[in-house]
Image: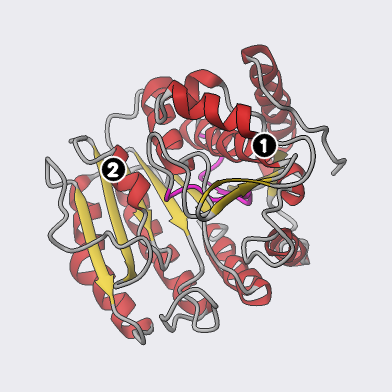
C-alpha cells in the first residue's frame, strides 16, 4: 500500500469518502471469502520511539504472516479515517481536541506517562478507529461473517477522556457504539483476552446494561483493574483474572467457567474481540504462558457461540503482543480460525 500524508485534523467529508472507498473495494471482491482483513499503511508510520515495545515491526510481522498462501481468500480493505460523530460516542470533545492539538509535526511529544505521538500517530489512531467501524459495517450488513482489524495503535486502555497504555482511541467501544447507532444492534458483547485488563472499555460501559464486557487477564499487572468483584452497575462486567505462570489449561478453565457461559446467556447481536496476544509465554510484558494454539482455541469457542446467537458476526481488533515473531504466529492461528466459519 502507498504511504499516506499525515493529517493533523479530519473532516466529516474526508471520513465518509474514505469509508465509501474502502467499502467499494470490499464489495467488488466479497463473494469469495467470509473474513475481512482491514489495515492501512498509516499504522506502520506511527512510532513512539526506537526502543518502544509497541513498534511498527509488530504490524509488519503480522502482515507478512498473512501474506501466506493459506490466507489468499482474505478480503483486504484499507481502514478509513473515523468520523468525529463516531468518535464522540465513546470520547469527549476535549479528548479529541487534545489529541489533534498535541500531534507534532517534528519528532515525538509525550502526552502521558506511557503514551507518545509522532507526526503519523494521529492519522494512524483515526484509521484504527475507522477500521473498526468498517469491520462492523461489513459484518452487520452480512457482507462478511467476521473481520480482523490489523491496525495500531491499540485501544482498550484509553478511557473516555484519557489516553494511556499505548492507546489513543478506544476502538472496541467505538465499534460497539457504532453497531448500535448505525445498525440497530441492541446487545453487543466485547470479549478481551489481552494479558492486560481493558480498563478503558470497562469504564466506558460500566453503567451500560446492553453491552457485556468479559475479560481474561493477568493480575496483578498493569493497569491494576479487573478484579472479579468489578461487575458494573448492571452486572454486565465479567472479569476472570489469571495469575503469573498460568497457561493454556487455566486459560481454558477461566473461559469455560466464567466468560463463555455469560457470553452465551447474553445472546449478543455482535461480538467484538479485543485480540491481544501478549499472554503468549515469550511476551516481554506479561507472565502468562499461552501459545498460538490457545488463541486458536478461544477463537473457535467464541465462534461457536456467535454461530448460535448472532449469525456468526464477529469483529476482532488487534490489541497487544510485543514479540513480533510470536505475535505473527498467534495472529495467524486466530485469523485462520476465523476463516473456518
Task: Identify the residue shown where x is 32% and y is 66%.
Answer: 216
Q: Quadrant of residue 260?
A: bottom left
Left or right, 235 with respect to 191, comes to left
Q: Is residue 214 visible in the rendered structure shown here?
A: yes
Q: Kindly state the secondary structure of the residue where label 2 is placed.
A: helix
Question: Which region shows up in magenta?
Answer: 142-157
User: Compared to 315, does 226 lie above or below?
Assistant: below
At which x and y percent is residue 266? 20, 46
Residue 268 at least partly seen: no
Quarter holding the N terminus is top right
Q: Residue at x 36, y 26 (%)?
A: 180
Q: Position of residue 54 (x, y in %)?
A: 62, 61
Q: Is residue 271 magenta?
A: no
Residue 203 - label: 2
Q: Main secondary structure of the magenta part?
A: loop
Residue 18 position (above or below residue 57): above
Q: Is residue 225 left or right of residue 338?
A: left
The image position of residue 58, as x and y in percent, is 68, 63
Image quadrant assignment for residue 252: bottom left
Q: Residues within 10 Å of mark 2 (few under 14, many from 20)?
A: some
Total numbered labels: 2
Residue assigned mark 1? 79
Q: Is residue 155 magenta?
A: yes
| Residue visible at 23% across and 61% down in the picture | 239
Q: Secondary structure at mark 1?
A: loop
**Residues under numbered marks 1 and 2 in contact, where contact means CB atoms less than 8 Å apart:** no
Mark 1 or mark 2: name the one nearer the start of the chain: 1
Amino acid at each position: 500500500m502507498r504511504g499516506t500524508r499525515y493529517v493533523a485534523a479530519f473532516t466529516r467529508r474526508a471520513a465518509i469518502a474514505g469509508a465509501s472507498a474502502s467499502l467499494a473495494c470490499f464489495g467488488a471482491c466479497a463473494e469469495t471469502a467470509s473474513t475481512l482483513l482491514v489495515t492501512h499503511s498509516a499504522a506502520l508510520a506511527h512510532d513512539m520511539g526506537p526502543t518502544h515495545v509497541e513498534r511498527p515491526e509488530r504490524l509488519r510481522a503480522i502482515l507478512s504472516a498473512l501474506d501466506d498462501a493459506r490466507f489468499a481468500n482474505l478480503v483486504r480493505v484499507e481502514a478509513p479515517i473515523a468520523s468525529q460523530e463516531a468518535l464522540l460516542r465513546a470520547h469527549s470533545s476535549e479528548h479529541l481536541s487534545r489529541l489533534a492539538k498535541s500531534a507534532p509535526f517534528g519528532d515525538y511529544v509525550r502526552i502521558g506517562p506511557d503514551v507518545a505521538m509522532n507526526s503519523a500517530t494521529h492519522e494512524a489512531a483515526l484509521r484504527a478507529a475507522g477500521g473498526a467501524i468498517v469491520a462492523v459495517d461489513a459484518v452487520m450488513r452480512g457482507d462478511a461473517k467476521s473481520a480482523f482489524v490489523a491496525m495500531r495503535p491499540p485501544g482498550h486502555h484509553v478511557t473516555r477522556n484519557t489516553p494511556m497504555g499505548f492507546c489513543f482511541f478506544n476502538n472496541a467501544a467505538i465499534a460497539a457504539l457504532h453497531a448500535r447507532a448505525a445498525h440497530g444492534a441492541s446487545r453487543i458483547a466485547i470479549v478481551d483476552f489481552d494479558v492486560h485488563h481493558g480498563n478503558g472499555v470497562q469504564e466506558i460501559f460500566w453503567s451500560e446494561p446492553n453491552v457485556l464486557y468479559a475479560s481474561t487477564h493477568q493480575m496483578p499487572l498493569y493497569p491494576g483493574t479487573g478484579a472479579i468483584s468489578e461487575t458494573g452497575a448492571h452486572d454486565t462486567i465479567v472479569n476472570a483474572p489469571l495469575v503469573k505462570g498460568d497457561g493454556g489449561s487455566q486459560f481454558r478453565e477461566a473461559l469455560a467457567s466464567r466468560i463463555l457461559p455469560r457470553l452465551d446467556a447474553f445472546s449478543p447481536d455482535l461480538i467484538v474481540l479485543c485480540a491481544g496476544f501478549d499472554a503468549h509465554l515469550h511476551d516481554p510484558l506479561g507472565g502468562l504462558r499461552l501459545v498460538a494454539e490457545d488463541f486458536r482455541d478461544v477463537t473457535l469457542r467464541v465462534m461457536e457461540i456467535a454461530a448460535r446467537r448472532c449469525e456468526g458476526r464477529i469483529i476482532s481488533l488487534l490489541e497487544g503482543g510485543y514479540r513480533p515473531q510470536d505475535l505473527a504466529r498467534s495472529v495467524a492461528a486466530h485469523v485462520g480460525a476465523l476463516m473456518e466459519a
